[in-house]
């Protein structure tokens, strides 16, 4: 694909960490809430949760809370309330170059989609409050599929919706789970990691479908234009 958009019809974005800087809110929320249970969470554990399904992340929180499932669910509800309170104040920062890239892609006649692990209620709030919703032709949320990232299902659903092949789409992702999902779906992917990958993390990525690693959405737009 490289910088030739002639065969591409659909661009699929992840949401959290890719278009909006919400990861810092999630992480602050978990740190704040877990203090109520005299528990702490390491940065390494928070990074393991990045791009993970709710089921996967609940399991990690449950382990921190001594295996108590009910406490883990209670803690998640408190974290959700924390997140909702923060974003209701309009405290959502867009990633650098987000609007500019969306406008550039739309100007080139491409359809735009979001494929996010966030559930419908939270994902819609983020898209509405950030002002991003009008840019997208289709959105699919984490609780609308059976198997979340790193499984490819959510991206395959987008292809099915637009009735395009994997080579007629590209994905823009920030998390390892998202990258694994998109490349397993055999969709060419721009990877914009918020944190560097650790040794060995790329071992399971099909690099045949990795367009490249980029520092920002602005860098992707510059690459496409040139």
Image (spheres, helix red, strand yellow):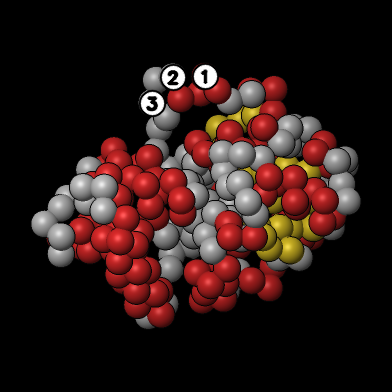
* Quadrant holding the N terminus: top right
Query: Seen from this angle, which residue lies furthest bottom?
Result: 89
Q: Is residue 170 above or below residue 34?
A: above
Give the x, y percent position of residue 67: 26, 47
Among the two numbered marks 1 and 3 on one chain, the one whose residue lies closer to the N terminus: 3
Give the x, y percent position of residue 17: 47, 52
What distance separates the C-alpha of mark 1 from that of mark 3? 10 Å
At x 65%, y 29%, the residue is: 210
Q: Are marks 2 and 3 in contact (CB under 8 Å)?
A: yes
Q: Are marks 1 and 3 in contact (CB under 8 Å)?
A: no
Give the x, y percent position of residue 162: 84, 55
Kindly tell me whether residue 7 is visible in this rendering: yes
Numbered disc 1: secondary structure: helix
Kindly tell me whether residue 220 is visible in this rendering: no
**Comparing labels 1 and 3, the label whose residue is closer to the camera:** 1
At x 30%, y 41%, the residue is: 45
As drawn, is 160 to the left or to the right of 133?
Answer: right
Foreground residue among 97 and 155? 155
Residue of label 1: 203
Please tell me the numbered disc located at residue 200: 2
What distance separates the C-alpha of mark 1 from that of mark 2? 5 Å
């Amino acid at each position: 694909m490289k910088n030739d958009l002639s065969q591409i019809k659909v661009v699929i974005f992840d949401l959290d960490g890719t278009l909006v800087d919400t990861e810092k809110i999630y992480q602050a929320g978990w740190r704040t809430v877990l203090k109520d249970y005299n528990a702490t969470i390491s940065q390494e554990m928070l990074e393991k949760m990045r791009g993970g399904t709710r089921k996967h992340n609940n399991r990690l929180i449950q382990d921190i809370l001594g295996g108590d499932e009910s406490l883990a669910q209670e803690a998640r509800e408190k974290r959700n309330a924390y997140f909702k309170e923060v974003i209701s104040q309009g405290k959502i920062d867009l990633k650098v170059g987000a609007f500019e890239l969306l406008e550039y892609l739309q100007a080139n006649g491409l359809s735009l989609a979001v494929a996010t692990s966030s559930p419908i209620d939270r994902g819609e709030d983020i898209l509405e409050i950030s002002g991003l919703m009008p840019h997208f032709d289709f959105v699919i949320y984490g609780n609308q599929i059976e198997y979340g990232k790193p499984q490819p299902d959510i991206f395959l659903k987008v292809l099915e919706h637009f009735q395009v092949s994997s080579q007629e789409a590209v994905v823009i992702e920030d998390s390892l789970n998202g990258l694994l999902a998109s490349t397993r779906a055999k969709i060419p992917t721009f990877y914009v990691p918020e944190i560097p990958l650790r040794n060995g993390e790329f071992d399971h990525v099909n690099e045949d479908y990795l367009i490249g690693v980029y520092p920002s959405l602005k860098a992707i737009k510059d690459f496409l234009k040139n």
